[in-house]
Image: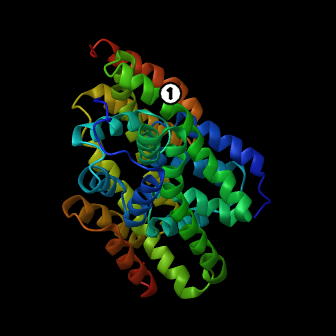
């Protein structure tokens, strides 16, 4: 593991969150590309493990970035990866929220919302595929991934049940 | 939106605790708990106001739920309200994941932990995929949005091009494409 350049990480994430219209799942593939392939700070497996661990914690799914930062460089790393998350929200949200209260039907806003939605969904698919490829090495792994998807699409259950079942399957050596 | 003067004033402390409660009950998706606390429990917002705030939150960059937190905090107690709401919302999960990080560093290499994590991560990928499929159902049955989605997927997920380049090309095209339909 290389020593992380926290300033570069901070600035890259900051730029990313300012354009991250799709939210955390849409930037997942980009954070993976940057941390794993550009900076070589983690392996693809470590990235996926950290993402997974954070899904078990309460709070928004995006907290995987905090865990990743902490794992890379302790408190400073956690701050370097978490603060960029908050800055765009604090600045843009208040400006746009104000504009939106004043002009709730602005055409530009609606055109962006409608136009960008499919891109966001494409990016989220990219995130899911990057993650699936990082964690799966054989057909049994893919089977568990796709079986999870199939069940979730049919049944509304707390995701923790699925993660628990995955842990058991892993310990028993089934996947 | 209607003015909120007619209602009880919302203190910063109340904002902090409300958003702490939301985040600590949010396992797998914060939206359900956010609505429940703000609309049903505290009655700070009507359903309609909540949906409006959520829509703006989705339009803005950054995590939707963080944007909603900032907007609600700001609406009731200005900038410092936004800050305390955010502190309640992100502070606790930060501590929890760092605790998990400590455990991962100490025990992450143990065989059973590795196996459990391997199993869980396959499930996590499946959960994300299911969420995306559910969201994709809202796309109109028209070739253009699907084509844009496929380009975004291929550029970032397969070619692994930087997100900023892909968005820089696709986003203006997407907005121009729907410009005439939006009136």
Observer-nearest of B112 and B180: B180
Taking the view exactly as shown, the residue that stands out farthest to the left is: A154
Question: What is the chain letter for disc 1?
Answer: A
Observer-nearest of B130 and A88: A88
Quadrant of the frame with the N terminus of chain A: bottom right
For the question of whether residue B161 can be seen, the reply is no
Residue A103 relative to residue A153: left or right: right
Place of residue A134 in the rendered image (x, y in percent of width and height, measured from the top left): 53, 61
Place of residue B21 in the rendered image (x, y in percent of width and height, measured from the top left): 40, 63
Residue picked out by circle 1: A95
Observer-nearest of B44 and A49: B44
Instruction: Tell me which corner region of the image, top left, top right, bottom left or bottom right, holds residue A153.
Output: bottom left
Q: Is residue A35 above or below residue A163?
A: above
Place of residue A8 in the rendered image (x, y in percent of width and height, measured from the top left): 75, 45
Residue A111 relative to residue A44: left or right: left
Quadrant of the frame with the C terminus of chain A: bottom left
Asked which secondary structure carries label 1, the reply is helix
Residue drawn at point x = 27 percent, y = 15 percent: B181
Q: Is residue B20 above or below residue B114?
A: above
Instruction: Tell me which corner region of the image, top left, top right, bottom left or bottom right, holds residue B139.
Output: top left
For the question of whether residue A171 can be seen, the reply is yes
Residue drawn at point x = 23 percent, y = 37 percent: B48
Residue drawn at point x = 66 percent, y = 82 percent: B106
């Amino acid at each position: 593991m290389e020593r992380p350049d926290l300033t570069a990480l901070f600035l890259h994430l900051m730029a990313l969150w300012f354009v991250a219209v799709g939210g955390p799942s849409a930037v997942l593939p980009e954070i993976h590309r940057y941390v794993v392939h550009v900076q070589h700070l983690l392996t693809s497996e470590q990235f996926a493990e950290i993402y997974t661990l954070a899904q078990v914690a309460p709070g928004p799914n995006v907290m995987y970035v905090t865990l990743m930062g902490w794992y890379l460089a302790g408190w400073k790393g956690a701050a370097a990866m978490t603060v960029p998350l908050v800055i765009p929200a604090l600045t843009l949200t208040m400006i746009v929220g104000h504009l939106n209260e004043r002009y709730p039907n602005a055409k530009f806003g609606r055109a962006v919302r409608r136009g960008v939605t499919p891109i966001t969904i494409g990016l989220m698919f990219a995130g899911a595929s990057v993650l699936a490829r990082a964690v799966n090495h054989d057909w049994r792994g893919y089977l568990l991934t796709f079986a999870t998807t199939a069940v979730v699409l049919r049944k509304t259950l707390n995701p923790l049940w699925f993660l628990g079942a995955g842990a058991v399957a892993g310990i028993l050596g089934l996947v | 939106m209607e003015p909120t003067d007619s209602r009880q004033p919302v203190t910063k402390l109340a904002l902090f605790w409300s958003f702490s409660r939301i985040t600590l009950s949010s396992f797998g998706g914060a939206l359900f708990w956010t609505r429940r606390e703000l609309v049903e429990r505290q009655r700070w917002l009507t359903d309609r106001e909540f949906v409006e705030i959520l829509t703006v939150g989705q339009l803005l960059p950054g995590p939707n739920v963080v944007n909603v937190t900032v907007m609600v905090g700001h609406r009731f107690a200005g900038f410092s309200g936004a800050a305390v709401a955010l502190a309640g919302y992100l502070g606790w999960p930060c501590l929890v994941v760092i605790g998990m990080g400590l455990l991962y560093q100490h025990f992450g290499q143990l065989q059973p932990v590795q196996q459990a994590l391997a199993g869980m991560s396959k499930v996590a990928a499946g959960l994300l995929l299911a969420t995306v499929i559910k969201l994709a159902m809202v796309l109109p049955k028209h070739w253009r949005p699907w084509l844009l989605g496929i380009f975004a997927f291929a550029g970032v997920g397969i070619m692994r091009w930087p997100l900023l380049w892909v968005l820089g090309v696709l986003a203006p095209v997407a907005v121009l494409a729907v410009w005439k339909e939006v009136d």
